[in-house]
Image (spheres, helix red, strand yellow):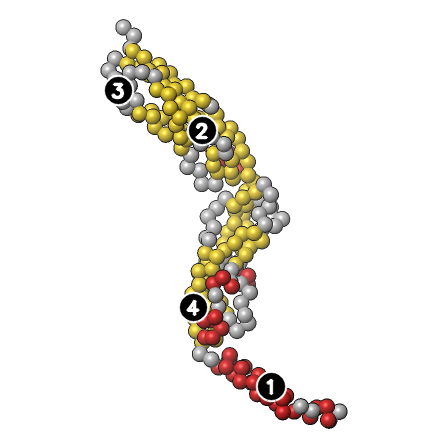
Amino acid sequence: MLSKLTENWALKLLALVFACILWFFVTGEQKLERSYAVPLELKNMPAGMMVANEIPSLIDVRISGPRTLLMNLQLQDIGIAVNLKDLEPGLITLKRLEERLNLPGPLKVTRLSPSYIDVKLERVVSKNVAVKHQLSGKPAAGYRVAKVNITPRQVMIEGAESEVAGVDSVITEKLDLTDARTTLREEVSLVYPGRYSNLKNNQAVAVEVVVEPLPK
């Protein structure tokens, strides 16, 4: 037994010395702090759902640790991933984001901003809403707008359930009638400033403004 313990004792001693040197190098090395803008990734979005609030794309993380380890830490090596699988609609508060970084042991997070995030999940729904026209200017003297035709008169919007529920119509960009003497026919873009919803199919509609002389 003793012979086995003393066998290759020189190599074992050398390995021990190197291990001690490495340990002292890591633990006794000058400490350093660095800031990183770490990407935040939302993964596995449940089918038929979406995020309906502002989520930061980057998290400000300050990390401290041995200088060598910290200088070798690359931004592409770290990230914060949040798994949304199987979550139900509602507001979810995600804390302890630093635990999702998977840093090497000697490195520590000293500051993280924001320290938590709120994720509001909503169902994705769609519905048809009316299209309303906008006109600017006036026809030439002696002329009037007899009627306005819009094709199609309804378009579909799609997005977060709460936002879609509050929308009854969308409007067109303004069509200028200044000094018009004849009927105008134009394809006009729709204006829809939705934050968590959008126009599903139609981005523009055909607008016909019938201009005719005033009755005598």
SS under mark 4: strand
The alpha-carbon separation of the residues under discs 3 and 4 comes to: 65 Å
Q: Nearer the viewer, mark 1 or mark 2?
A: 1
Dot 3 or dot 4, earlier in sequence: 4
Coordinates of residue 117 in the picture (x, y in percent): 50, 54
Q: Is residue 182 left or right of residue 124?
A: left
According to the picture, the residue beneath numbered tag 2 turns out to be: 169
**Identity of the residue drawn at 39% across and 27% down:** 188
Mark 1 and mark 2: span between their CA atoms? 76 Å
- What is the three-letter code of the residue carrying label 4? Arg
Asked whether disc 3 touches disc 1, contact meaning CB atoms under 8 Å apart, the reply is: no
Structural crowding at the residue carrying mark 2, measured as other residues with C-alpha within 10 Å and reported as few (<14), some (14–19) or many (≥20): some
The residue that mark 4 highlights is: 34
Query: Callout 2: helix, strand or loop?
Result: strand
| Element type at mark 1 | helix
Seen as rendered, the residue at the extreme right is 1
In terms of depth relative to the viewer, which is nearer, 118 or 33? 33
Indicate the position of residue 88 as horizontal and vertical percent values.
60, 46
Amino acid type, mark 1 = Ala
Q: Which mark is residue 179?
A: 3
| Mark in front: 3 vs 1 | 1
Is any part of residue 215 visible from this angle?
Answer: yes
Please report whichever mark, 2 or 4, sits nearer to the chain's N-terminal start.
4
Nearer to us of marks 3 and 2 is: 3
Q: Amino acid at mark 3?
A: Asp
- In the orientation shown, which residue stands out farthest toward the left? 141
The label on residue 15 is 1
User: Quick check: marks 1 and 2 in contact, CB under 8 Å?
Assistant: no
Q: Reply above or below: 106 against 137.
A: below
Q: Nearer the viewer, residue 43 or 167?
A: 43
